[in-house]
Image: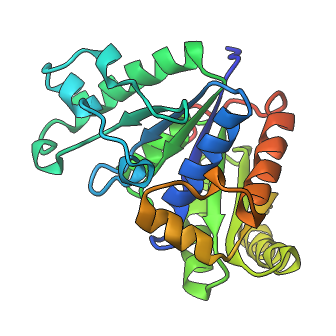
Amino acid sequence: MKHTSTIVTVASGKGGVGKSVFAVNLSETLARDGHRVALIDADFGQGACALLLNETPQTSVLDVALHTARAEQVFHETTAGVTLVQGVADPRQLDGHEAALYAALDEVLRRLRATHEFIFIDAPAGVGEPVRWAFDRADLGLITLVGEPTAIADAYRLAKLVWHAEPAYPMAVAVNFTDTEDEARSVAFRFGKITERFVQRVPAYLGWVPFSAHVRRSVAEQRPAVRTAGPVRTAFDQLAAVLVRGQTPVGEAEGAV
């Protein structure tokens, strides 16, 4: 089945690598460029997207699953024009309703895919059930990498899980927190050598985001860094351009994990 949209799951092997910050800034960049963009926060325990955007969605997908809201009520339009969807607002209400939540998420995703060019799923760190759901629904898996050995090892475990289930799964990496692009390419190259050795697959290199005090300030201010001109905004412009150019060839990976 062909779609006019691309679903990208943004993931990481471990927390603390700037994954949600990455997803938020990339979403805003594409929206600023005139694309119709949605961002689903699928971290059911400690979702950060609304906080990073300084937005307050009134309804979550869990509310739909619990029959206290309608599906169309979860589409929260941000000031930057991104359709923000919060998976779970109160994790205490989730227990025992996981199946209903995933069914509601699938319905929300179906509606978004009919109206948006890009849909980003901000998956939680690790390899748990929400991560598997997010990869199953995506057309592209995007792993956020940093140069720390433990982060690379955890990212490898995630990539191995996906590729063992579906060897042809489209996977890319973006490198965060480096001083130069050469350093970022070196991190991606080392990661690719590991995956090539053990699972005979190498992810595409999407791009990099420089280490910057501006990003840290933007998190504290709840104002995405790309709203201000500078090296970080330039980096995300380049990442967005790569995604737009690659939108057509990216194949579906539904049911992979």
Pick the front one: 248 or 27: 27
Q: On screen, 147 above or below 192?
A: below
Q: Quadrant of the N terminus?
A: top right
Asked whether, in this view, residue 173 is left or right of residue 25, the answer is right
161 or 61, which is in the foreground?
61
Task: Residue 115: name its quadrant.
Answer: top right
Residue most extreme to the front: 228
Q: Is residue 194 left or right of residue 100?
A: right
Residue 82 horizontal/vertical position (percent): 53, 32
Please provide percent x and percent y for residue 140. Answer: 67, 42
Residue 15 x %, y %: 45, 70
Tell me: 135 left or right of 40: right
Residue 72, x across and y down, in percent: 34, 14
Q: Is residue 204 visible?
A: no
Q: How is the image coloured?
A: rainbow
Q: Which of 30/110 is in front?
A: 30
Does residue 250 appear in the picture of this structure? Answer: yes
Does 87 sit above or below residue 70?
below
Residue at 64% across / 33% down in the picture? 31
40 with respect to 225 (left or right): left
Q: How many marks?
A: 0
Rendered residue at 56%/50% (across/down): 23
| Residue located at (78% from left, 71% from top) | 188
At x 39%, y 18%, the residue is 107
Query: Is 178 situated above or below 22?
Result: below
